[in-house]
Amino acid sequence: MLITQDLTYRYPDSSTTFRFPDLRVDRAGTLLLLGPSGAGKSTWLHLLAGVLSPSGGRTELDGVDYAALRGSKLDRFRGRNIGLVFQRPYFLEALTVLENLAIARRTAGLPPDRELLQSTLHLLGMDDYADRHPGRLSVGEQQRVTIARALVNRPQLILADEPTSALDNRNAARVSALLRERASELGAALVVVTHDERLRGDFRQVVDLAQQSIHN
């Protein structure tokens, strides 16, 4: 379960303070953070991911206030418990798809598990791509590998940053469904941050930043 309370953030040398609504996302629950560019979505995502430390408040995942963690403890917690799906795929191009997934486990301090890696690719229909290099994949295939990498450590929280913004309607619907299905199977909370209005009807909870003021 993801809970945030009284979450605020102020960038250095700025007089603007972002104040975010409290969130509660249960296991296998889904939340869409919807809003235009400049509304504070990226800041919110980075706070939820533990990339930024809040100026105030807490971010709690299954009872752990990870906003209070620092250094290697935070890195280890994030690697084991939070799966990140980036808007643009970031891979080590010299490595195969399977090797890129293995790196995600290694950096989280988890043992290699080839069977788990293969089964994760299978769930996303990517069995035949394990030994290919990312540069040889289409945009849609790279997006699926990005999702696989986010899932391979069986996280408790999946965060997706604009996962459908570059996709047509058909592929956007597929990616949305894949994220929700895999989160449900893992019992993970899913939070998608986007300006893509096409996703509004797919999620149980929607926070629309266009209808709220989150900074002063």
Image (cartoon, rainbow, N blue to C red):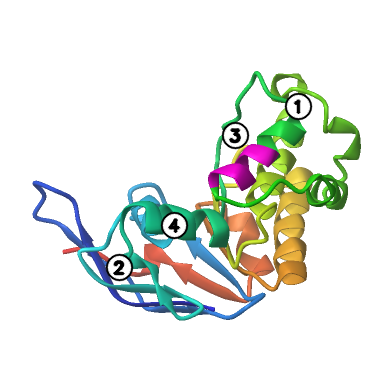
The residue labelled by disc 3 is 89
Q: Position of residue 172 (x, y in %)?
A: 71, 48
Disc 4 vs disc 3: which is toward the camera? 4
Nearer to us of marks 1 and 4 is 4
The first of marks 1 and 2 along the sequence is: 2
Cα separation, mark 1 vs mark 3, equals 11 Å
Q: Can you say which quadrant of the picture contains the C terminus?
A: bottom left
Q: Which residues are magenta?
A: 102-107
Query: Which numbered dot is residue 138?
Result: 1
Mark 1–mark 2 Cα distance, whole angstroms, equals: 40 Å
**Mark 2 element type:** helix
Callout 2 amino acid: Ala
Left or right, 62 with reference to 186: left
Q: Nearer the viewer, mark 1 or mark 2?
A: 2
Q: Earlier in the sequence, mark 4 or mark 3?
A: 4
Residue visible at 84% across and 45% down in the picture:
118
Q: At x 20% / y 64%, what residue is drawn?
A: 55
Mark 4, secondary structure of its residue: loop
Which label's residue is closer to the chain start, 1 or 4?
4
**Which residue is identified by label 4?**
49
